[in-house]
Amino acid sequence: MNQLYFKRKAKFYFFASLFSLCSLSTFATDTISNQNKSNKITDADAYMLFSSTDVTYNRTWLEFSRTIKYKCKMVVNTRTGVDKYAFFNLMPSVRNKFDQLQINTLKADGSTVQLDTSLLFKNKTDEKSLEMIHYPIPGVEPGDTIHTTYSYTDILEKNEMIDFVDLFHEVPSLYTQFRVNTAPGLWLRYKSYNGFPDPVTTVSDTVASCTFRQKKVRAINTNQYTCAPCELPYLYYSIEKEKNHLRTWKEVYNQEFNIITQPIRIDLEKSSYYKKWKKKVLGKAVDSSKYHQFNLLHQEIINQMGMQAPTREEFLKTNGYFLKKKHFDPISIRRMYRQLLEDLEIKYWAVFARSKRSGKIDPYYIRRGEYDHVFFAYENPNNGLTLLYPHTEDHYYQINEIPTALYNTDAIIARPAIDEKLRRTDKFISYDLKMAQVDSVAVNVIKLPCMTSNRNFIKQIYYCNVNLEKKETTFKSRLSVSGGMSTDIRSFYGMLGKNKEMSDYYEALSEFEGDKTDVEIDSITSFHFKNEKPFLFSVNAEGHIKESVHFLNDSIVSISLENLLLHNEINSELDSLDLNYYLDFAFTDFCMYSFKFPCNVELISQAEVNKNFANKFGEYLFIMNVLHENEIILRSNYKIKSDIIEKNEYEELKALNELVKDIKNVRILVKLKSVKS
């Protein structure tokens, strides 16, 4: 889920290193620290005396290993430092791999307290979980120093011998060191970015080492909006078996595209059903253009096929099998798309992309682990590119719809350099298990599309009827969502792909939203969706408002806005930023309430509440007026105009959000007058 819909309880996912210690992490998470206000590192709530990481790669005949040795000393100066940083942070996946683990607290009086580290392993958290375990180090007081030492060993596949590294912690550090060691027969290849320090290199008969050092490293923490690799110095390295081998786009295409997209003909169960299905769907359209045929087939998959997790039993099944069973998985759907494109002789490209907040791609130095999105682009009748993103278990992507994390990012497109008639061995993986191999590829860099704030929107309109006799307020509503908002919400709930009841959707919405809302949906009356860009969908509903409309007495009604206006404000609770905010997209969040009374009404005199504010990053408009003497109209419009909020202009975002906060605190008093005939 991305940042843009009811973010207060939004779940965001990040790629962490295997674990962090003393609040150390690669591209650390959580919130931006305010410790940097002091020029002296030692004045911070907590700071590192030193932090040292030593990573050694070895190989045997059959496997590769990586041994990580780490040690640090962290001084805790204040009670705030104890509360925030006196933790051992552990990823469940490495819990049982330690060769050594020792955590000592050096007390201010000179004594030492050793932590019973066996307590760390009593937690039964699933080892596959990405949720870090935060174990508090007991007995730490201001003035103490936490000394931590550990080592552990991993067994790795060749493609796992890479890493992206920075030297920053959640607390400042007087001295930080990172060393990579390789055994004979392995070679370290690296590239630094954004001014990462140059290494000190040593070579002996038994080991080659590169050591990266930095003194006086400031504290940097990130959150769900920041992109550490976009701004901070960092290092990428890989361990290679050959000294002079440079990875090529031919290898990327064969290893990262062909391997997940080439159809299979090994288990032939129901394989013939593919042609029957295709003929049935196309019908008389078989003589139409190949692009129209593909659109029809693609839409049939969305309408009729389920999506589920891959299983071992179905891994070698053909596309005909999945069509007959009426379901696909994220791997088989790629194979299906490729077979359709090739059968219809539509020219296509492999697209290699990287999520915006994972950092920019490097088109000139090909890095393993670079791309977290691999999909298709194919030619269209206008000589342009049409994007084709494979469905996931939770979301059915329409043609030209992509994850919002890719909006406005660079991507690499690649295809065979020479157009040749496909041989059967190029189209299918058969019993010999040989995959298609291209000899050369043509490569280009493209900018993936985004949409403006006028197309990325959510609009909520409520027509409310105030019943004085029953003292209740009912409504008819229309929710409209477009662009990136549409993709994000549909991705999160899997609403369209899993054919959920709309009432289930709203129940999930309320749970996900987290904040108290007084808008209660009783029934859904209609639903509409357009499968073309900007993918507008709308929901008409009926319901009631619980407590925000309060009947004080027979002549005065109170309307509270706090639980009615639930705009998606971009977080601005921090005092300042160390890094820019990188949003998936700019957007508009509009909300309107019409409260209709059975009598004439009058707004009891109060301060002017109407707002019309704009600055570099956003706009906020609030208008309240009385219509036809018995109807109160409230309009609230929150707009973010840029997908980047610069750290040195963060105050403008705070000013925008402060206006919204002020309006939410408004309580409207309505005087009931004569009954309207």
Image (cartoon, grey):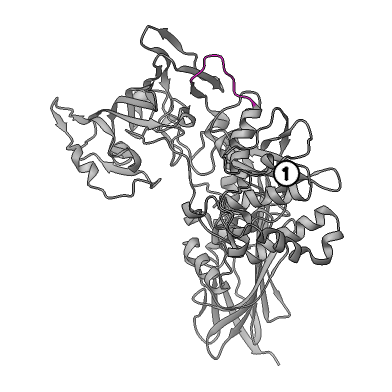
Residue 442 lies, in percent from the top left, at: 74, 30
Which residue position is annotated with label 1? 377
Q: Is residue 337 above or below residue 226?
A: below
Q: Is residue 390 visible?
A: no
Which of the image's four quarters has the C terminus?
bottom right
**How many C-alpha atoms fall within 10 Å of the one at disc 1: few (<14), some, or many (≥20)?**
many
Residue found 69% across the figure and 52% down from its top: 401
Q: How many marks?
A: 1
Reply yes or no: does residue 243 show up in magenta. Answer: yes
The residue type indicated by label 1 comes to Ala
Residue lying farthest bottom? Answer: 677
| Residue range (magenta) | 241-248
Residue 100 lies, in percent from the top left, at: 23, 29
Secondary structure mostly seen in the magenta stretch: loop
- For residue 579, what is the image quadrant? top right
Q: Answer left or right for 617 relative to 85.
A: right
